[in-house]
Amino acid sequence: MPEQTTFTDIDDFLEWYKSKRPETIYLVKNKQRYAEVMNAIKTIYKLAYESNPDGTMIKKPTPDELIGDTLIFDIITNLVAFDSEESQEFCSALSKATTFDIGTMTGYKKVLISMKFADVYDFAPAHNPGLKLVKN
């Protein structure tokens, strides 16, 4: 029977998780998903920036170090406004995201729009003999 571990808070869980992960994880781009996500990010970037060029900070997409296969894209702004056509374009691009969160940034009078795109990377099988990539 597998070992049962109980955690009292998220920090305990994260420390346990990090201790179980290999020190180095090799990833390769999931070419189809990567292209789809980058097109979505370019569209979202363009719409957000054009909506409010002076009040919008767009962060460079970064891999999620905890999960590994996910790309994170954040926009910090005080206003984003779209017309009907732009809204449809935004929603179409946003539909490529796995998660989408909006929250206020206390003390900054800004809003954080955060998107995560899963399955952008695959774990490289050459560096993990027990792992086989299976493409659907």
Image (tube, rainbow, N blue to C red):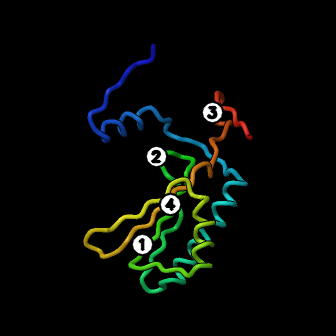
Q: Residue 85, position in %: x, y?
A: 62, 79
**Residue visible at 41% across and 34% down?**
19
Circle 2: residue type = Leu
Residue 93 falls in which quadrant of the image?
A: bottom right
Q: Which of marks 1 and 4 precedes in the sequence? A: 1
Which residue is the site of mark 2?
66
Percent x, y for residue 117?
56, 55
Between disc 1 and disc 2, the foreground one is: 1
Residue 36's place in the image compared with 20, above or below, is below
Numbered disc in front, either 4 or 2: 4
- Residue at image coords 46%, 70%: 75
Tell me which label, 1 or 3, sits earlier in the chain: 1
The percent position of residue 37, horizontal first and vertical second, equals 63, 60
**Residue located 64% across and 36% down the image:** 127
Q: CA distance from mark 1 to mark 2?
A: 22 Å
**Quadrant holding the C terminus:** top right
Amino acid type indicated by mark 4:
Met
Residue type (three-letter) at the residue carrying disc 1: Ile
**For residue 60, which numbered disc appears in the image?**
none
Query: Label 4: which residue?
Result: 115
On the rendered structure, is 129 left or right of 66? right
Looking at marks 4 and 2 on the same chain, the residue that comes earlier in the sequence is marked by 2
At label 3, the amino acid type is Asn
Q: Which residue is mark 3?
A: 128
Mark 2, secondary structure of its residue: loop
Nearer to us in this view, 81 or 120: 81
* 19 displayed left or right of 127: left
The residue to which callout 1 is attached is: 76
- Disc 2 packing (10 Å; few <14; some 14–19; many ≥20): few
Report which quarter residue 130 is drawn in.
top right
The answer to the question of whether label 1 and label 2 lie on touching residues, with beta carbons closer than 8 A, is no
